[in-house]
């Protein structure tokens, strides 16, 4: 029953919107085309911001800076019972969803999906957000220059998500 409903829910919503728009005498096709034009122009305006983020993350990982940083702080992490393997995910998650998904995938391939670190990576991936990506792309697209408070709040929320992931995984799996 639920599976059948899920197959039809999106088409039914679209049909409802079209019928309601027609009932209200809104030119639905013209509005659809207008929205498509706006979507294409928005995608083109976001491209430089996306490219900058992807290149920056690739350079950081390929240079070995990430591995050097993790090696440097490994003794402190071990003291607090934080697996050093999770640090690259914790650092890339606020920057890029795609990069952090790649890191999480590497962790799960290396450690296994049922390992503590694999479960922690999955939990962390779902409990944090791409703060810097959101600020760069969306704030840049609409021309917001002052984003200091949003950055602080976003990074605090990411930090809390990382800590919550650790606590929850230690409570459930550790």
Image: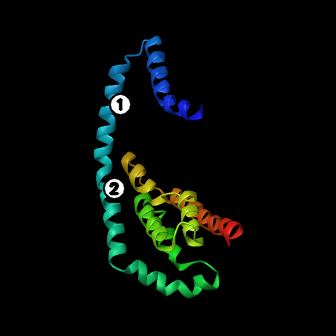
Q: Secondary structure at mark 1?
A: helix
Q: Position of residue 67 (x, y in %)?
A: 42, 81
Quarter of the figure with residue 154: bottom right
Q: How many marks on residues?
A: 2
Point out residue 90 in the picture as x, y percentages from the top left corner: 51, 69
Q: Front-most of 52 and 142?
A: 52
Report, in whole angstroms, how far the alpha carbon at label 2 lies from the one at label 1: 22 Å
Q: Nearer the viewer, residue 35 or 123?
A: 123
Q: In terms of sequence position, does the residue under pointer 2 or pointer 1 come before the other?
A: 1
Q: State yes or no: discs 2 and 1 in contact (Cβ < 8 Å).
A: no
Secondary element under disc 2, as helix, strand or loop, is helix
Quadrant of the rendering where the N terminus is positioned = top right
Badge 2 is on which residue? Answer: 50
**Mark identifier at residue 82:** none
In screen coordinates, is 70 left or right of 40? right
Q: Is residue 45 above or below residue 78?
A: above
- Identify the residue under disc 1: 35
Residue 4: percent from left, percent from top:
54, 31
**Crowdedness near tag 1: few (<14), some (14–19) or many (≥20) residues, C-alpha within 10 Å:** few
Residue located at (37% from left, 16% from top): 27
């Amino acid at each position: 029953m639920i599976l059948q409903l899920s197959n039809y829910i999106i088409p039914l919503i679209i049909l409802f919107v079209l019928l309601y728009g027609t009932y209200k005498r809104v030119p639905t096709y013209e509005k659809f085309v207008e929205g498509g034009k706006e979507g294409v122009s928005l995608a083109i305006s976001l491209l430089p911001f996306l490219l900058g983020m992807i290149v920056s993350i690739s350079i950081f990982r390929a240079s070995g800076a990430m591995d050097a940083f993790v090696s440097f702080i490994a003794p402190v992490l071990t003291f607090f019972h934080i697996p050093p393997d999770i640090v690259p995910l914790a650092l890339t998650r606020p920057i890029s969803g795609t990069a952090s998904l790649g890191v999480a995938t590497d962790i799960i391939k290396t450690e296994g999906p049922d390992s503590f670190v694999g479960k922690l990576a999955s939990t962390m991936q779902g409990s944090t957000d791409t703060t810097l990506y959101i600020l760069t792309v969306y704030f840049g697209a609409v021309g917001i220059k002052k984003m200091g408070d949003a950055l602080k709040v976003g990074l605090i929320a990411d930090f809390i998500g990382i800590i919550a992931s650790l606590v929850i995984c230690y409570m459930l799996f550790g």
